[in-house]
Image (cartoon, coloured by chain):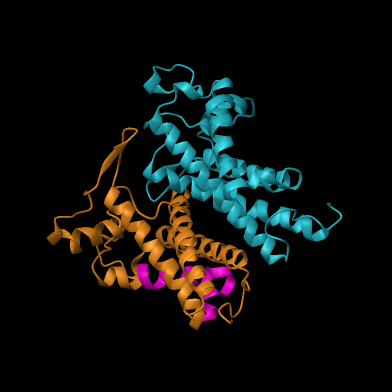
Chain colours: A cyan, B orange
Amino acid sequence: MLQNKVNVQVIVWTTLIGGFFSSLVKWGSEVNMPPRMPGEISPPGAHIDAWLGWLGINSHSLDYVYQGVTVPGAVTLYHWLFSFAFAFLYVVGSIWWPRIRLWFGALYGIIITIVMHGFFIPLLGFRNPVYANGATGWLWNLNQAELWSEILGHIYWSVSIEVCMIAVLAYFGRPIKGNWVAA
Amino acid sequence: MLQNKVNVQVIVWTTLIGGFFSSLVKWGSEVNMPPRMPGEISPPGAHIDAWLGWLGINSHSLDYVYQGVTVPGAVTLYHWLFSFAFAFLYVVGSIWWPRIRLWFGALYGIIITIVMHGFFIPLLGFRNPVYANGATGWLWNLNQAELWSEILGHIYWSVSIEVCMIAVLAYFGRPIKGNWVAA
C-alpha cells in the first residue's frame, strides 16, 4: 500500500488539509453553541496541566495577547495537533475499515464524541462540569447543551475531513469512494 | 449552462456545503487572531443596526444564552448568510471567470479582504477602529493585527470553499479544474 507514492500523498495531504480546516470548523461550531460554561477549563487545557507540568508547560504557556485578547497559545496548538492526528487516523483507518467514512464522515464524529467526551476524558479525570457540582462528567452526567455542542461540532468537524479527503482523492485521480488504495 | 441539471447541482451543493463550512472556518480563524479589540462592534453587527432598524431588528435581536454565554443570534445568522452568498458568487463566478479560483481560491479571499474590509465597509461607515481614535477604517488606517487576521482568515475561508467545490465537482463526475461547465 505504502509502496504506492500516490497513496502516501493522499494520506499526507488529507492529514494536512483535513486536519487544518477541521480544527477551524470545530472552533467555529463553538461560536453558536459553546461547549462549556464560561470559566471552565477545556479538556485540552486540563490535559496540558496534568501531563506536561513536569516539562514546565501548562495551559497558560504560550499565552499571547492579540488585539487586546489573551489567546491561550498552548491550548490552541494542542487543539490543532489533535485535529491533525485524528484526520490522519481517519484517512489511514479508511484503508482497512472503509465504513469509517459512513454518512460522509458523520459516523466518525459521533463515535469520537461518545468515546472521547462521554468516557475517555472523564475517565482520565479531565471533565467535572460545574453544572453537575463537579461530578465526573460521564456521558450520562453531561447536560444536553454540552452534548449537542460536541455532537454537532464533531459531525461538522469529521464531515469537513471527509470533504477534504474527497477533494484530495479527486486531485490525485483516485476513486473518491470505496477502495481508494487499489492500484 | 443551466439547462444542464448537473451544473445546477454543482452550484447548489457548492453554495450549501462551501457556505456552511467556510463560515465555520472563518470563525475558527478568529480564535488565534481576533480581528477586533474586545467591545468593538463587528461589521455584521453594525450593518444590522444601521439597515434593519426600521424592521425592529438590531444586532441583539435573536440573542440567546447557551451554557451561560450570550450568543448574538442575528449577527451569527448574518455571518452565515453572507458566507452562503459569497460561496454562491464564487461557484457561479467561476463559470465566466475561472481565474477566480486561482491559488486554490486564495485570490478570492485576498480580494474580499481588500475590497470589503479595506474600502467598502469603511465607505459605508461601519468601521471606525478604536485604536485609530475612531477614524474611518480605510485600508491604510487598519492596523497590522486586524489586516493579518482578516487576510489569513479570508484565505482559509475561500480556500475551504474551493476544497468543497472540488469535492462537489468530483462527486458529480465533473472536471475539478478548468471549464467545469462544458457538457
Give the x, y percent position of residue B183: 59, 81
Residue B130 lies in what quarter of the image?
bottom left
* Range shown magenta: B97-117
Residue at horizontal 54%, vertical 23%? Answer: A122
Q: Main secondary structure of the magenta part?
A: helix
| Residue A121 appears left or right of B45 | right
Residue farthest to the right, as pictured: A3
Residue at horizontal 38%, vertical 73%? Answer: B115
Give the x, y percent position of residue B154: 46, 63
Residue at horizontal 57%, vertical 46%? Answer: A158
* Foreground residue among B156 and A97: A97
* Foreground residue among A45 and A117: A117
Give the x, y percent position of residue A125: 55, 20
For the image, the number of numbered tags is: 0
Give the x, y percent position of residue A177: 68, 56
Per the image, is A18 magenta?
A: no
| Residue B59 appears left or right of A69 | left
Residue A96 lies in what quarter of the image?
top right
* Foreground residue among B169 and B6: B6
Asked whether residue B153 appears in the rendered view, the answer is no
Query: Compared with residue A54, is residue A26 higher up or lower down, i.e. above or below?
Result: below
Query: Compared with residue A86, is residue A14 higher up or lower down, i.e. above or below?
Result: below
Residue A97 lies in what quarter of the image?
top right
Asked whether residue B167 appears in the rendered view, the answer is yes
Residue at horizontal 57%, vertical 31%? Answer: A116
Per the image, is B109 magenta?
A: yes
